Amino acid sequence: MTPPSQHIERLRHNVLTEVLTDEQFRAVSGELAEHRFGPGEIILEDEAEGDSLFLIANGRVRISKRDRQGRETLLALLHPGDFFGELELIDGRPRAARVTAVDDCIVCSIGREAFEKLLRENSALAYRLLQVLSVRLRTVDNQFVDELQRQAEVSGKEIGRLRLLIEAAKVLNSTLDLDKLLGVILETALGLVDGDRGTVYLLDEETKELWSLVLKGGERIEIRMPTGSGIAGYVAATGDTLNIRDAYFDPRFNPDFDKVTGYRTRSILCMPMKNRGGTIVGVFQILNKRSGTFTADDESVLDALSVHAAIAVENARLHEQERQKIAMEKDLQAAREVQMTLIPKRVPEVSGYRFAAVTIPAREVGGDLYDFTAKEPGQLAVCLGDVSGKGLAASLLMANVQATLRDQAFTAAPASECVRRSNMLLFQNTGNEKFVTLFYALLDPANGSLTCCNAGHEQPFLIRSGGEISRLTAGGTVLGIMEDFPYAQETVTMEPGDVVLIFSDGVSEAMNASGEQLGEGQIQAVLKEHHRGDPEELKEALIAAVRAHAAGAPQADDITIVVVKRTA
């Protein structure tokens, strides 16, 4: 479409065609074709073939180039009276950039042949073209130098930032004390972003609270707040970054601190502290940048510091856990040594009888007990108990039970009465969530009578010299759940060759990797095979059977065995 007269008049003053005479311009205008483009519409595509020069009659166009990563760089912004597309006509190569309409644009094109004819016939136009190209080249040169300078400044800042972060990482690794580390992290963060004051909060995953340590009257005290509450709580809950220029215009800001202390909070930068996995482990809250307000660069620096701080916090926590573990292990070892002193160091030596006993805790300390106590008149109390639970708490209760049972040695009470009294004392002095199973027996070596009371314990086996097996069942419920219970007792007479095998459920319920229990059937089999030998032999054979059945599976419960055999 031929341009209308008003556009022809505009083109008469184009920077390229204004050097033409009126006669020359009239000749050129007959070769022009008008084109219209809307905002954002591509006029020429990069790398496309070109055969026209374009004169801008109205609107603006942008010249841009995309790099290999798809990032677009603005090369020039051309206005009415300018032109583009000349390079492709001069060197015959594809378009070197993309041309896009910024506004509603009207451009007029002139073809290659007409353009080349103009250049040949009009030295003034050729000279003007060289002038414009020279100006554009100088502009590009200046832009290139400016961009290099800008990149150098950015790189310098990045290098400086990296140096600061490297130094910060060194500082953060200077202590494994978590309380001190919070102060180190805060001072490092303040230094990096030029903040005046601040707080570093850590997230308590169990309570879903933020906590930190602050100075109050020269003493460091712990403060806590729920996630979602206040500015720091909001950041912990959402993971958002809050860069607040004026704290008093933010409804989440609580001015009470300022009122109490006289401090004036202006700007706040509050950001999540995240570990390498992106999980929020704490919050930075920095107040009042000393010069101006917090910037995007400050956010970037704190974000980079975040991972280093999170690693330092994790290391400090692991160190504290290891320290506590070592201290606990020392305490448990001391408890084990105390517990071992409470267990008889040797079995009794009684004429006509042989004994064997062992306890193997599942942990450092156990909740099983066995004991042999001399009791008047001329009797021997034999007991095996199992406290509910395992570990230190069970071992402490076991020691209490043992002391209670030994007190009964000073009375002439029968077995059932000794158990009843022990039950009452245990009920009165412990919580009802704890209980004890107990087998308690009084042996009279002179006549071989064994009077037994079983308080909810595994029923012991009595095997006669001829191999007949029975169970010792009389008694009642476990100790510690009812204040008074009428326990029963039974008396059996042990003849030479008879054996009583007492054991805890850690024996009968010993499991292998498939979850299968040893069971009382295998215990009977071991008893039948070894009851004619020494009690020590029977005890070792039963332990071997438990270990063979477990086949390497971890021991889940305490194992305790007592063997009583009449030999004459």
Image (cartoon, rainbow, N blue to C red):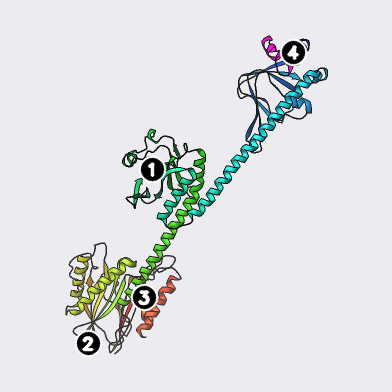
Residue 362: quadrant of the picture: bottom left
Is disc 1 in contact with disc 2, using a CB cutoff of under 8 Å? no
Q: Secondary structure at mark 1?
A: helix
Residue to which mark 2 is pinned: 447
Residue to which mark 1 is pinned: 233
Is disc 4 in contact with disc 2, using a CB cutoff of under 8 Å? no
Residue at the (56%, 46%) spot, across then down: 160
Residue to which mark 4 is pinned: 29
Q: Position of residue 368 (x, y in %)?
A: 31, 72
Pointer 1 or 2: first along the chain: 1
Pointer 1 or 3: first along the chain: 1
Residue to which mark 3 is pinned: 523
Pointer 4 or 1: first along the chain: 4
Q: Position of residue 287 (x, y in %)?
A: 42, 41
Pointer 4 or 3: first along the chain: 4
Region rendered in magenta: 1-22
Residue at the (21%, 66%) spot, across then down: 429
In the image, is residue 27 part of the stretch drawn in magenta?
no
Q: Residue furthest right?
A: 120
Alpha carbon separation for disc pair 3 and 2 = 28 Å
